[in-house]
Image (cartoon, helix red, strand yellow):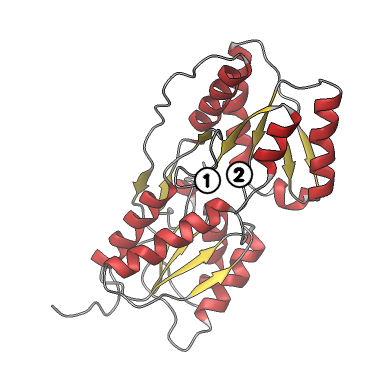
Amino acid sequence: MVIRRAPALLSTDPFFPQFLAGVEIGLSTHDYALVLQVVGDAHTERAAYERFARESRVDGVFLTDVRVADERPRHLADLGLSSVVVAPTSASTNAGEVVVGMDDASGVRRAVHHLYALGHRRIGHVMGAAGYVHTEARKQAWSQALEELGLPDGAIATADFTGGSGTRATHELLDLQRPPSAIVYGNDLMAIAGISAATDRGIRVPDDLSVVGFDDIPLAPYIVPPLTTIRQNVVAWGTAAAETLIASVEGREAHPIDLPSVEFVVRGSTARARNPPKH
């Protein structure tokens, strides 16, 4: 697994420790081991794959942080390396690419419908780093849910999944002339930072602003207020990815993937809008 991330960004992302734990569960069962490298740019990542293939150092590759129109699966196929794409199930792929993922979109749609039922009509979104398939999938699900409910396009701010960017993006939305009464975040870390940013401005969560995260990290139930969020079983996802990749490496058909469904978990960071529409 070659992760192309700035070390500072990687160190703050709670997704990867859980995913790697799942991968190790799947690999160790079959006596495989993980080779992990963190790189800072596309050129170094490409060179790492070419070195792995040339030196026969690895049997297969996990592709994470999949980007829109990602060329890496094709490049790995040209190198003769098996790969599995770790991405939302909505990701469009080319023939022969194997995708193992969760249905991000269903969780985001449920979040928007939950907020609508609470009377919120200005529902904003803080998205993660642009260009990633999972960022675009969550953003599109948010936008489509608004359209389904007959709501106008909501306010959106771009961040990068870190707490600092979540703070900045939250202030950006709350500075609008008509700020949202609810915000759906691309991950829990940004949502927690958003709650802190709102509190610093004297905005109470959930009385004045409802907040929804994504991931259900271990800290989510223990913040104040406890975070309403979208839960995905990242450990099971990593295990399924490992088992699928091993099957590909060994030239056999993988067992059907039966991952737990994405769940919407309601806690204390969402509440009825202060001035819900009259019916």
The picture quadrant where one finds residue 96 is top right
Q: Residue at x 66, y 64 (%)?
A: 164
Q: Nearer the viewer, residue 34 or 205?
A: 34
The image position of residue 137, as x and y in percent, is 48, 55
Q: In the image, is residue 129 above or below residue 98?
A: below
The image position of residue 195, as x and y in percent, is 51, 65
The image position of residue 265, as x and y in percent, is 36, 47
Q: Quadrant of the C terminus?
A: bottom left
The answer to the question of whether label 1 and label 2 lie on touching residues, with beta carbons closer than 8 A, is yes
**Which residue is under mark 1?**
219
For mark 2, give the secondary structure: loop
Task: Determine crowd level at label 1: few under 14, some 14-19, many 20+ residues with C-alpha closer than 10 A.
Answer: few
What label does residue 14 carry, if any? 2
Spot the residue most to the left. 279
Q: Nearer the viewer, residue 219 or 152?
A: 152
- The alpha-carbon separation of the residues under discs 1 and 2 comes to 10 Å
Question: Label 1 sits on what residue type?
Answer: Leu
Q: Residue at x 63, y 39 (%)?
A: 16
For mark 1, give the secondary structure: loop
Q: In the image, is residue 121 above or below residue 73?
A: below
Q: Can see residue 1?
A: no
Left or right relative to 183: residue 128: right
Q: Quadrant of the N terminus?
A: top right
Going from N to C along the chain, the mark reached first, 1 or 2, is 2
Q: Nearer the viewer, residue 78 or 178?
A: 78
The image position of residue 128, as x and y in percent, is 58, 59
Q: Residue at x 30, y 77 (%)?
A: 274
